Image: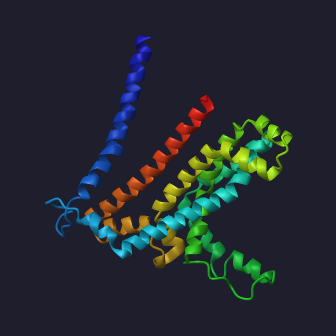
Amino acid sequence: MNHNTNFRFFSLSIVWLWLFLFALMPFLLILITSFLHHSEGHLAELPLTLSNYTQLANPLYLRIFEKSLLIAGATTLLCLIIGYPFAYIIARMQGHLKGLFILLVIIPFWTSSLIRSYALIAMIKAKGILNSLLLAAGIIDQPLSILFTNTAVLIGLVYNLLPFMILPLITNIERLDYRLVDAAFDLGANRFTTFRRVIIPLTMPGIIAGSILVFLPAMTLFYIPDILGGAKSILLGNLIQNQFLIAQNWPRGSAVSAVLTLILATLILIYLWSARGKEKDEWL
């Protein structure tokens, strides 16, 4: 017993030390830097100031925040619309076929998302695969201008983040008590009513978890807007990257990072609150 207790204490100590050094400390450094002045000769300098936060009220930054929220929200919604039926079908499968489809969902993780984003260029550019097929089928008369637009960014985000929506949904749908679905049918509910009043509420934790896993990286990924959106598509991830690496304005970049972290932490708290409410309902 004493040996197990010591091993557990040692393991937890390593985990907490790792989190402190590589999670909490970097965030604290970013938070402190966000209250310092920009300096040409140094990364930042005293005295303390709130100007880095007040300047984020500039209409230019507000438009970037608004655009990032809209694109991240649209990405999350599209992933949910596409991923929910796919996850439901996989969760209801039996035998080796189910494992095969789960493997197909996981396979994209084996390849760098950066490489997959470049591969999309070959598909959606003016003389790419998509336009060639549509032209050959007579559906369009001239190539669609998709590359270097917000539409291309949205396609790239959905393509890269869709597995993050499907996997939590599969796990949650597998735990669904289908006796409740059968009871709804026995009570006269049609398929749509059963789906809306029974299945959706019971799988809401998976929906929220998948939405957070998609929404968070959609707000912060910077290379997908760079590759597929070009210079016209500036999101929060690009703004932070530009402030740190191009403008060399670490306090301003830190302020944007701190605000973004606050937004993401709020979403995680909402998820935890909803999950806790779900557990209370189950106990009642």
Q: Position of residue 97 (x, y in %)?
A: 79, 44
Q: Position of residue 54 (x, y in %)?
A: 27, 66
Q: Residue at x 84, y 42 (%)?
A: 185
Vertical side of 173 occupied by 248: above or below: below
Decide if residue 58 is on the left or right side of residue 90: left
Q: Residue furthest front?
A: 187
Give the position of the N terminus as an image quadrant.
top left
Query: Tag count in the figure?
Result: 0
Q: Residue furthest bottom?
A: 141
- Closest to the observer, 161 or 31: 31
Q: Residue furthest top?
A: 1
Decide if residue 195 is on the left or right side of residue 171: right
> Does the rendering let one see residue 174?
yes
Vertical side of 49 occupied by 175: above or below: above
- Closest to the observer, 184 or 199: 184
- Closest to the observer, 198 or 42: 198
Decide if residue 17 is on the left or right side of residue 267: left
Q: Position of residue 277 (x, y in %)?
A: 55, 38
Q: Position of residue 256 (x, y in %)?
A: 35, 62
Give the position of the C terminus as an image quadrant.
top right
> Does the rendering let one see residue 94?
no
Q: Residue at x 41, y 27 (%)?
A: 11
Q: Residue at x 68, y 85 (%)?
A: 143
Look at the image and name its color scheme. Answer: rainbow
